[in-house]
Image (tube, rainbow, N blue to C red):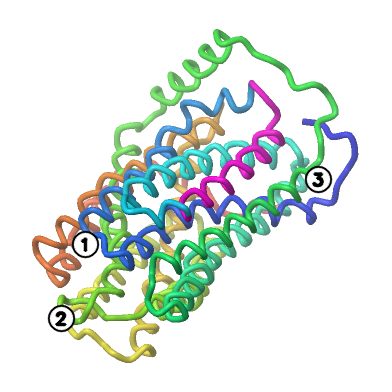
Amino acid sequence: MATTHTKNPWTWVPSLYFAQGVPYMLVIVVSTTLYKRLGISNADITFYTSLLYLPWVIKPLWSPFIDALYTNRWWVVFTQFMMSGFMAAIALALGTSSFFATSIFFMWLLAFGSATHDIAADGFYMHGLNTHQQSFFVGIRNTFWRVAYLTGQGGIVVLAGYLETRYGDNNALAWQHTFYLVAVVFLIISIYHHRILPKPEKPHPRFSLEEIKTDLTENVRSFMEKKGLGIALLFILIYRLGEAQLVKMIAPFMLDAREVGGLGLSTTEQGLLYGTIGTLFLIIGGVSGGVLAARYGLKKMIWYMAFAMNLPNLLYVLMALTQPESMVTIGLYVSIEQLGYGFGFTAFTLYILQFAQGKHQTTHYALATGFMAMGMMFPGMVSGWIQEQVGYIPFFMWVAICSIPGLALIPFLNIDPDFGKKQQA
């Protein structure tokens, strides 16, 4: 996608990837806190919010149409505008008697828009920048996606908690106003990108449906013929088996009353813990993992990273047993867990990148991340039901046990000893 004129990537790369992260955080993370504060059961929260992963699971099926029908720029602006509308619709739905079913419907539309936006934004990034610029800005885009993470899990939740207190614990009204505000901000972002994003120099090519079908079939066929596909997909599906259940139950555990095994935190306290301290240590872990992987390579580091990601899950067993009241103590546990997660998730990302290498690597990466999303969706769907059956202490013990299958597969993975290492000049 050549452009009519060069625009400084600093004017759009940070905002583009901030816009990519916010709706994902609303759908996958913030939704669990929202519905917990509105009185929905843990089983229903985890089942229905985990289903919201589905658009990211199946997005490779429509990605060829995104690139074929209009420009990536058009899709970026269009989906951002539509997502601002879906956010406003969620806010409106929260004031109705059937708020759960109605808001989940619009959450699903928001998830579909976010997954489509991911495709277009990544395509625009690759075609709008040369290879040197892509390398330079990869850290910037990841940083601003994490800023969105902080904004979602921290700022938005903290704001809702503040409004809950201000409105006399009228939680529905507090969350309505929060989503209306986010919708307005996102509308402003879409207008900004409509004005600032570089425009294509040439008319966008049009492809027939037959050409699109042929291209998709070829990409899927070559993916299915990859060496070691079975072990690779099994690893992608179960490496995060414990985390998939844990992540859906963190907010309910933090917010549930102490009498039922929770920590009894307020919405604001939970948002501050995970949106500020937790995110800071998540970033430190991710950066550290990238530095060490670049120095020693994925094959040498994967065991350290895998254990760093899974062992801290035992801290939730400890928290459920002791139910600490000190925010300092809880913050320490959260910091260690998020540090380990950030460090360990680097290995998972690098493994998928290595597996996707070769012809059609962009599509293969999308397919692999679709399986990754599937690995988060199905365990997450049943996590609330399991917790309600056994209680928090046995549930977190179960989460720790679920880490074992992914670790057991590591010796069978085909990993290039030099993959990830910085190449010497």
Of labels 1 and 2, earlier in sequence is: 2
Residue 341 x/y as whole percent: 40, 65
Residue 161 x/y as whole percent: 44, 75
CA distance separating discs 3 and 2? 53 Å
Q: Which amino acid type is shown beneath numbered disc 3? A: Arg
Residue highlighted by disc 2 = 259
Q: Residue at x 66, y 40 (%)?
A: 76
- Queried whether the magenta region covers residue 333, the answer comes back as no
Q: Secondary structure at mark 1?
A: helix
Residue highlighted by disc 1 = 399
Q: Nearer the viewer, residue 223 or 282?
A: 282
- Queried whether the magenta region covers residue 80, the answer comes back as yes
Prevalent SS, magenta region: helix
The 10 Å Cα crowd at callout 1, few under 14, some 14 to 19, many 20 or more, is many
Residue highlighted by disc 3 = 195
Q: Secondary structure at mark 3?
A: helix
Of labels 3 and 1, earlier in sequence is: 3
Q: Residue at x 36, y 72 (%)?
A: 337
